[in-house]
Image: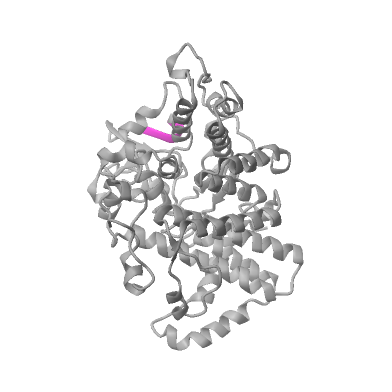
Amino acid sequence: MKNIKNLLIIGIASLLVMTGCSEDFIDRAPISQQNSNNFYRNAEDMKSALTAVYGALQYGGQYYSSMHVIGDMRSDNTEITNPNAGADLQAVDNFTNVAVNSISANTWNAHYQGIQSANIVIEKIQGVSMDQTLKARYIGEAKFLRALMYFNLVRIFGDVPLVTTMINNPQQGYEYGRESVNNVYNQIISDLTDAEEALPYTYGTADIGRATKGAAMALLGKVHLTMKNFPAAAQKLKELIDASGQTNYRLLPQYASVFGPTNQNNAESIFEVQFKSSSSGEGSPFRNQFAPIGSGNAVVSVGNPLGQNIPTADMNNAYEPNDLRKDVSMRTSYVLNGNTVNHNYVVKYSGMPVANLDSDNNWIVLRYADVLLMYAEALNEQGYVADGPAFEYLNQIRTRAGLPSKTSNNADPNLSVPNQAAFRLAIEQERRVELAFEGHRWFDLIRTDRALALMADKGMQAHMSIFPIPQSQIDINPTRISQNPNY
């Protein structure tokens, strides 16, 4: 039986058949659309179409590259130390990126391609005769994926076009201008609410990797937290924690057991982007991307080391002594030709590629440790309680890491959290080291209004909390698409 990872190959091929175009696409649109309409005949066709939506998450402008560039490299977690790693990447790192930077363009395009694929499923499935429960589930999966992609877009760019119906021809695209952040978030919440209702808690082996009810709940909790609706965030996250009997989510005893190709889709993982090596472009690039330039085969034995996402000295120093997570996440040196080279690099994505940029490492988008820390944060934001429930969830994470608990009045000042402001910093610190190099840090700092304070000396200015709109989008549709302020 094929799980979602195996089906991605089929799904992407189907998407190419459905949406492929050439220079004369506009002239041939009626014919192409007719062929597209004829494709959606039965449940199996819709399964392939839905799998293509999952496949969009693998695009370079999504979790293949952009999300770790923005989520970590933009922050104080990682950096570009070698200019040969790429000028556009270095510009994102140094806050010198402009509207023609390829990172913005690739991120925008890849997410809207995925959203169009989701809209195709949601619209076309309506006319397909199939089991109604399965139909509702497929719609729920598509809405979850659409919500995830819009959540990324709105956090990166601010106001963005809100497209919730299938675009049938290029001219339709010109009708969409930027919608307010609030309108986009309202659509995300609506999609996730629908997805939660329609999706199951678990799947059989054949469907491992698909979005679940728990994934919708976790993402909805994160959305509410981002919007600073702390009561709603706490309520949804607690519902998910209390549903552990149905979801089977739990903290694994060992942090190291969460990561690597042999541990994928484990009991702590809530939603992962699936990659598979030796499968015609379905492999992941992270082991090559994160190996230092000049490291030869000391860090990655197959393919080229690209020098991206290099942990900063500040990130290295963020770990407390004896934190078991550090060696699982990063190293500070490697041995090349018998010589020790001092250079930080990420090791969390441990699967060795079979060819350049072709390994089995999945990308974890949501996991249970994130849920526990978000819940602790939401509780604290509603009111600090000395040694209350928020401490319990914070310390669950620390205990697994081999670290002593933090309390409200600890004799050790490094372990004392006496008030709400101190608890905020304790959560910030714990999220940084627990979720290191998983693409969360930048979004956490923006959400908590801490980015400018921590990164002004890196070149950040107030308007840089969101990215510039790609200049190509403004040029294409100047009457409806405008640039973010001060870019």
Residue 119 can be seen, yes or no = yes
Q: Is residue 308 magenta?
A: no
Q: How many marks?
A: 0
Q: Which portion, as a residue range, is magenta? A: 327-331
Q: In front: 214, or 294?
A: 214
Does any portion of residue 302 appear in the rendered image? Answer: no
- Above or below for 207 versus 366: below
- Which color scheme did the rendering employ for the protein? one colour
In this rendered view, identify the residue nearer to me: 378 or 165: 378
x, y percent for residue 14: 56, 71
Residue at point 70% right, 37% down? Answer: 242
Quadrant of res 188: bottom right
117 left or right of 65 in image: right
Q: Residue at x 44, y 54 (%)?
A: 64
Relative horizontal placement of residue 475, taking residue 421 as reference (left or right): left
97 vs 387, left or right, is left
Dominant secondary-structure state across the stretch colored magenta: helix
